[in-house]
Image: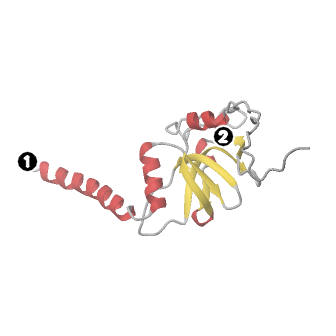
């Protein structure tokens, strides 16, 4: 009986903290987005104001009391958006080094010759005020969108029948 009260108090403290955290960020779209992505362990895509693109897992904690100044991201891949088409061109694939599982051990050494590094060493700090757009990133959906679209055959225009109207007669 005596152990029940302290345990209940501790559990309430933990669960109430989560409740108040979620309530505090409810009105901040970026904070809510980042918390949702972290909770679901789904990767996100960020486009920066210089057209650089990062895809990865949210690493940083959430504290609405201090305000968001940057985002910590464990990158899976990065690249840039083409200036004319805005299409993404990925140039760096971090998953070749440490895998694509966001729950993988971030402190395990990488294979040789990079055994002096861990995935944690690649965590990237991105300034929040330079983010142009953000969204969830689903690799299978991305691959589907990259498939070439079948083109519909073009039809030659049918000759139009004229009713006479203001068209001059042919000579």
Residue 130 position in % (x across, y down): 63, 64
Residue 137 position in % (x across, y down): 55, 44
Q: How has the structure been colored for display? A: secondary structure
- Tag 1 secondary structure: loop
Residue at 57% over, 33% down: 140
Viewer-side residue, 2 vs 44: 44
State the CA–CA distance, disc 1 to disc 2: 52 Å
- Judged from this view, the residue extending furthest toward the right is 171
Q: Where is mark 2, residue-wise? A: 94
Viewer-side residue, 13 vs 159: 159
Specify the quadrant that holds the C terminus: top right
From the viewer's perspective, tell me whether residue 149 is left or right of residue 25: right
Residue 6 position in % (x across, y down): 17, 53
Viewer-side residue, 95 vs 104: 95
Q: Where is mark 1, residue-wise? A: 1
Residue at 59% over, 66% down: 129
């Amino acid at each position: 009986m005596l152990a029940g009260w302290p345990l209940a108090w501790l559990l309430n403290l933990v669960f109430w903290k989560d409740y108040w955290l979620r309530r505090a960020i409810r009105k901040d779209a970026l904070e809510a987005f980042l918390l949702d992505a972290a909770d679901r362990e789904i990767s996100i895509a960020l486009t920066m104001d210089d057209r650089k693109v990062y895809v990865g897992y949210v690493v940083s904690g959430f504290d609405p009391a201090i305000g968001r100044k940057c985002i910590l991201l464990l990158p899976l891949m990065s690249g840039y958006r083409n200036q004319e088409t805005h299409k993404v061109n990925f140039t760096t694939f971090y998953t070749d080094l440490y895998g694509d599982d966001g729950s993988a051990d971030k402190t395990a050494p990488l294979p040789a010759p990079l055994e002096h590094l861990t995935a944690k060493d690649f965590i990237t700090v991105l300034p929040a005020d330079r983010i142009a757009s953000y969204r969830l990133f689903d690799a299978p959906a991305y691959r589907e969108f990259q498939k070439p679209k079948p083109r519909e055959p073009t039809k030659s225009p049918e000759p139009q029948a004229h009713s006479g109207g203001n068209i001059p007669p042919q000579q």
